[in-house]
Amino acid sequence: MSSWREEPSDDSPADLPSLETLDSPTGSPPTASLSSLMELENCVSNLSLAHEIVVNGDFCIKNRSPPTDSLEGRVTDIIHRAFWDSLQEQLSSDPPHYSHAVVLLQEVKTILGSLLLPGHVRLRSQLDEVLDMELIQQQVQHGALDLHRLAGFVISMMASLCAPVRDPEVRALQDLKEPVELLRGIFRVLGLMKTDMVNFAIQSLRPHLLQQAVQYERAKFQQILDKQPGFLDNTAAWLQVAASEEALALQAQCDSPGPDCRALPSATAILNRAYMRLLRWDPQDQKYPETMQMDRSRLDALSQQLQILVLEASVLLLTGTRCQGVIFSLQGFVGKLKQTITALLEGSHTREADLKRALLELGEAVLQQVKEALSIQGGGELPQESQDLLRGQISELWKNNNSVRTLIEGRVQGFLLAMLQGGSTKRRPELHFPLRLVSPELAELGTAFGRIVHFNRTVFGPFYAPILRKMLLPSGESETGEDSR
């Protein structure tokens, strides 16, 4: 039994074998442009896969079937049912026809062969001996094919090759007697075993990829640029906007001259500001920087976490202000309040109507917990005017320009920017109320964001450098600024 293990997938693989691959149609060869596009797509696909394996420790391949209630799912189900019904009809005829069954056995042999390692010499010899396709054809011609015997050998070999997590499913195959059901079950479990083997290979490959990740991703990205020179256009526009924002910020500082007043922003400051912009990226803006595309889903998830965190801290600030903070010293009050806020706001960020409804419910829930806390402390009730004001202020947080939400978001952005500027060698900036109450979540967010930024800057620094140099030294002056890395 193999020593590697994988968790079973919740999704069932398709149980229809691929059978034979159709020959490509004859005619003129593909055009150079089509060939280039295919090469480019393969290059992007390889780069994305390698990047995902490196940065996502939980990455694995899963068997996926289309939803049963979708058009794709219904069509797939019809095709599968037709195939297996056809096989059933062939095997049930008198005399039985084995044309489909022979093709299936050939594919079973191919799949089992792909699961064998170089050291499996004896098993490979047994596989070639038992599933000798010439011999099987002769047995078919003489009406002597024993499908159950061959299936028994296949199941035995599957048991010796599968991950321990698949043992119950392989054993269950031994209880199947009907030939079509047996072959269908074999293909289903073989599909799972193929996925297990791929995931085992990914886990084995990850340490080697980690060592070579930076050089590999740079080389692959350069290949893409060689095929499509304009592949950095969105990246250049992204950095240009960040450079303009940084220049305006510096100009504001220069209105009151001091030691921090600079003539030009640094490359590092521009890059940090550019990375921060990704956390407030307009989902409708399709011009996402090419160098960040592979991390977009992760950054979008962090952006959503950031918005929830801003709303959570805003509610804590409003609650503390209205109650003058007296109940925040009550044991467990802050933790329970944070749980309530997180639970009610979960999933509400995607639609404005959902956020409005969630904030209305949240206002009532916060007031209820405040009343309970005041009762435990033996204090007086919160005045009705204060209750109405707190409820109204919480409900108004749905607005992007809400003053409290804007204030908190600015502080959170400042914290994350300080973490980028300080890196891992400096202390994190000190947090004050109410961010101090969400410091674990904020630190986790900042660490995840910093990890993405650090790896991206390391990989793509050489691609950012000439873009930034052109922005900072438009007249061809000698370079004096910082390296983009």
Image (cartoon, rainbow, N blue to C red):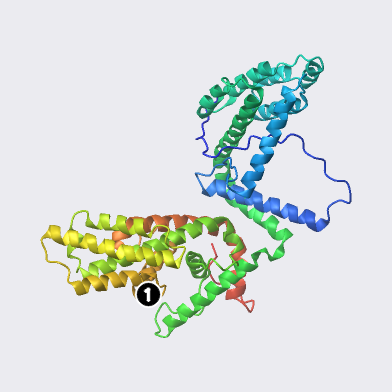
Counting from the top left corner in percent of width and height, residue 248 is at: 48, 80
Counting from the top left corner in percent of width and height, residue 442 is at: 37, 59
Asked whether residue 5 is in view, the answer is yes
Residue that extends furthest to the bottom in the rendered view of this protein: 255
Image quarter hosting the N terminus: top right
* Residue drawn at (50%, 55%) of the image: 298
Label 1 packing within 10 angstroms: few (<14), some (14-19), many (20+):
few
Image quarter hosting the C terminus: bottom right
Indicate left or right for 12 with 326 as reference. right
Q: Amino acid at mark 1?
A: Asn
How many numbered marks appear? 1
Foreground of the two, 256 or 171 = 171
**Residue hosting label 1:** 402
Residue 380, by quadrant, is bottom left
82 relative to 241, above or below: above
Residue 412, by quadrant, is bottom left
Counting from the top left corner in percent of width and height, residue 150 is at: 68, 18
Indicate left or right for 82 with 12 as reference. right
Residue that extends furthest to the right in the rendered view of this protein: 27
* Residue drawn at (54%, 23%) of the image: 172
Residue 330, by quadrant, is bottom left
Counting from the top left corner in percent of width and height, residue 476 is at: 64, 76
Indicate left or right for 424 with 107 as reference. left
Asked whether residue 1 is in view, the answer is no
